[in-house]
Image: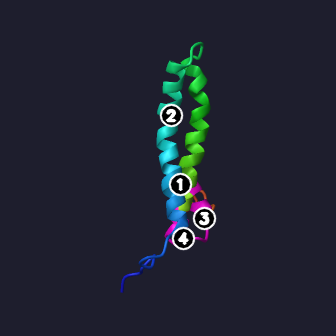
């Protein structure tokens, strides 16, 4: 039996927020670079403010997407594990039971 994540005709606000955050994450860097070209006296280095904005928007997008799918417990730990490569349960990679 397949699991349905949303009912027809019912909006999923977390999915909408995930898409918006994803678009912001993708668009913010090119827009910042283009602004440095358009503004006189601005250097390319001035666009560096967009890097943490894009990083936060992408993490928010992933977290909203997981919430939209119904994954509510421990999603922050799993996200951190995916980003860093560390195990989600807090065990070190070398602490494997034989």
Label 2 vs label 3: CA separation? 34 Å
- Sequence order check, earlier mark of 2 and 3: 2
Q: Is residue 32 above or below residue 1?
A: above
Q: Secondary structure at mark 3?
A: loop
Furthest residue in direction bottom, as rendered: 1
Q: Nearer the viewer, mark 2 or mark 4?
A: 2
Asked whether the residues under the numbered discs 2 and 1 touch, taking CB atoms below 8 Å apart as contact, a structural biologist would say no
For this rendering, which residue is in front, 36 or 25? 36
Residue 10 image offset from top left, x and y in percent = 48, 75
Dot 1 crowding, Cα within 10 Å, few <14, some 14–19, many 20+:
many
Q: Is residue 35 above or below residue 1?
A: above
Q: Is residue 73 magenta?
A: yes
Name the secondary structure under disc 4. loop
Mark sitting on residue 61: 1
Q: Residue 95 falls in which quadrant of the image?
A: bottom right
Assign the N terminus to one quadrant of the image.
bottom left
Q: Residues within 10 Å of mark 2 (few under 14, many from 20)?
A: some
**Which residue is the site of mark 3?**
89
**What's drawn in magenta, residue-wise?**
65-80
Q: First in sequence, mark 1 or 4: give its number.
A: 1
- Classify mark 1: helix, strand or loop: helix
């Amino acid at each position: 039996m397949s699991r349905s994540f949303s009912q027809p005709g019912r909006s999923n606000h977390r999915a909408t927020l995930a898409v918006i955050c994803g678009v912001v994450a993708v668009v913010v860097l090119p827009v910042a670079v283009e602004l440095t070209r358009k503004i006189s006296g601005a250097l390319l280095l001035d666009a560096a403010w967009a890097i943490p904005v894009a990083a936060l928007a992408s993490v928010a997008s992933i977290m909203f997407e997981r919430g939209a799918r119904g994954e509510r417990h421990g999603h922050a730990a799993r996200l951190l594990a995916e980003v860093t490569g560390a195990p989600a349960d807090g065990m070190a990679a070398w602490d494997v039971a034989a």
